[in-house]
Image (cartoon, rainbow, N blue to C red):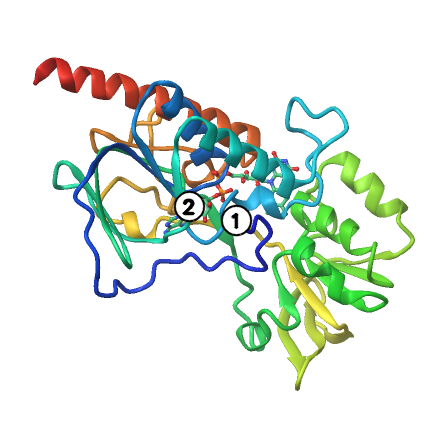
Amino acid sequence: MLDFKLTQHQQEAQPLVEVEQKEHQVYDLIILGGGPAGLTAAIYAGRAALKALVLAGSLPGGQIANAEMVENFPGFPDGIAGAELAQQVHEQAQRFDATIITEVVREVDFSVYPLEVRTSSNIYHARAVIIATGTIPRRLGVSGESEFYGRGVSTCATCDGFFYRDRRVVVVGGGDSAVEEGLFLTKFAREVIVVHRRDELRACDMLQKRAFANPKMRFVWDSVVEGILGDQAVKGIRVRNVKTGETSVIDTDGVFVYIGLIPVTGIFKGQVDIDDNGYIITDRRQQTSVPGVFAAGDVQNPDFRQAVVAAGSGAVAAIEVGRFLAGLSQTQ
Ligand SMILES: Cc1cc2nc3c(=O)[nH]c(=O)nc-3n(C[C@H](O)[C@H](O)[C@H](O)COP(=O)(O)OP(=O)(O)OC[C@H]3O[C@@H](n4cnc5c(N)ncnc54)[C@H](O)[C@@H]3O)c2cc1C
């Protein structure tokens, strides 16, 4: 049974360690990533009778598994817990014979054919690849953040909120994720302080209304975090008002950071075209700059980072893989 609710995911590329075992089988398709995009691609690949392998990394089910409740995925009129949605999509992909394993991809070589994908323990080959490695949370980059990461600093309220019963917590950010996760934290914490660098939230109207109506939520506007303070545990944060320049300390037991996302594309640099912000460039058929290599989901879409959009692009990519392989077999 896979854990669809991991505490943190650390899937930045690690240095390649020595490969102990080699696999000689050539798959029709290897899908890199087991989130909504990758697993939907696996469902479509299975239904097209393609032999597909999903390398799901350390967050099987993807980021949606960390969402407390998903209210905007079609087919669930009462909403569905993110972990349950992830589990269901995973089971659906397995029903269509996708092999799903939680190895982390360390290196790829798209200059050879069949295309090559390496993990710590295996070398895999495929006639097509779909990259669906999603994004990871952006860090604040201030003093104390790394030191207290995982013990007072978090990027996942759904995973860690439980530990803050009757405590005071700070949420950094002003978008949908920050407000949604802040609201979730009010179930446990006695007070949730949202620190935002602007004087208004970016979150959608519905979330804003819920947040402003919640008596446990408080807002510190025009402020950026300059440091996380503590000794054995987090005790507070130092903030600077960007309008007045004044600094002050806010006492807190925990800090939840939602200041944006970074695409997981480090291992693809030099292999496929990537834009200035690190996102993989595709055409509307999800084709990258390398024939046979496609990309789907948040890793190639900074504008619409939603599960349903990721799933849709995963479907498109898998359909296109089928066409690519059919074209290839006609020329052979
Ligand atoms: C807290 C939270 C709440 C959200 N709520 C909603 C919501 O209510 N509705 C909604 O539509 N969207 C929501 N989203 C956004 C949604 O989760 C994402 O848009 C969606 O998960 C993107 O899917 P994806 O498959 O592109 O990437 P991801 O879900 O990010 O999945 C990436 C996958 O790639 C894998 N991976 C990464 N690196 C490697 C590697 N090197 N090797 C192998 N595998 C790797 C990971 O393990 C993971 O399986 C929420 C996100 C968060 C964080």
Give, as a three-letter code, the residue at label 2: Ala
Give, as a three-letter code, the residue at label 1: Leu
Within 8 Å: ligand 1 and the Cβ of disc 2?
yes
Image point (21%, 16%), residue name:
326
Q: Determine if residue 321 is in view.
A: yes
Q: Position of residue 47 (x, y in %)?
A: 39, 19
Q: Position of residue 126 (x, y in %)?
A: 22, 36
Which label number is shown at residue 2? 1
For the residues marked 2 and 1, what is the alpha-carbon distance in whole angstroms? 11 Å
Image point (52%, 44%), residue name:
62
Question: Looking at the image, which is closer to me, 159 or 156?
Answer: 159
Image point (56%, 33%), residue name:
307
For label 1, the crowd category at 10 Å Cα-Cα, with few meaning under 14, some 14 to 19 and many 20 or more, is few
Question: Looking at the image, which is closer to me, 143 or 157?
Answer: 157
Up/down of 278 relative to 306, above or below: below
Q: Determine if residue 241 is in view.
A: no
Within 8 Å: ligand 1 and the Cβ of disc 1?
no
User: Residue 259's quadrant in the figure?
Assistant: bottom right
Q: Residue at the top extreme?
A: 330
Label 2: state its secondary structure.
loop
Up/down of 47 relative to 290, above or below: above
Determine whether, in the image, residue 165 is placed left or right of residue 89: right
Which label number is shown at residue 56? 2
User: Residue 155's quadrant in the figure?
Assistant: bottom right
Query: Is mark 2 in CB contact (under 8 Å) with mark 1?
Result: yes
